[in-house]
Amino acid sequence: MRFAGLDLMSLRRNTLLMTVQTPTPFPQPGPLPEQVHFDRHELGTILSLYGRMVAAGEWRDYGISALREVAVFSVFRRTAEYPLYRIEKRPKLRARQGIYAVVGAEGQVLRRGHDLAAVLRVLEAKRIRPVD
């Protein structure tokens, strides 16, 4: 039987000779690692301090990073420079030194603890300066 230049008998014969194999699945490396994030309450506390410091003219920009082991809120005095302070959240340190830390520009840990508001007070104390 021919249909518009196509030999249907040979086509049928060739399809019967083909073998069907199941596709090989791609190797799965396992579940993707969880990222650490600041929750809404933590961000509210941090952004409240950030707003006060911007109003005082101390800070101008910020950046947020959510990595596998740490979430970082970086504070900048000017855009596109090194961070003035980093507020870090490390859940693995929950049972040890504390989940939150404030790190200075040179990498020194200014304060570490379990309560975010208490840890951020070190930045409030830096804002108070004597008036000449």
Image (cartoon, rainbow, N blue to C red):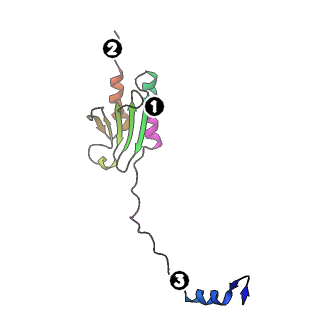
Inspect the image, locate mark 3, and give the three-letter code of the amino acid beneath it.
Val
Inspect the image, locate mark 1, and give the three-letter code of the amino acid beneath it.
Ser
- Compared across the picture, whether 128 is left or right of 7 comes to left
State the quadrant of the C terminus: top left
Q: CA distance from mark 1 to mark 2?
A: 23 Å
Q: CA distance from mark 2 to mark 3?
A: 82 Å
Dot 1: what SS? helix
Q: Residue furthest right?
A: 4
Q: Residue drawn at (38%, 36%), measured in percent from left and top?
A: 74
Q: Residue drawn at (34%, 48%), measured in percent from left and top?
A: 91
Inspect the image, locate mark 2, and give the three-letter code of the amino acid beneath it.
Pro
Q: Which residues are magenta?
A: 28-49
Is 42 contained in the magenta span? yes
Q: Which of pointers 1 and 3 indicates the residue nearer the eye?
A: 3
Question: Which residue is identified by label 3?
Answer: 20
Question: Which residue is identified by label 2?
Answer: 130
Dot 3: what SS? loop
Task: Give the x, y percent position of residue 97.
Answer: 26, 43
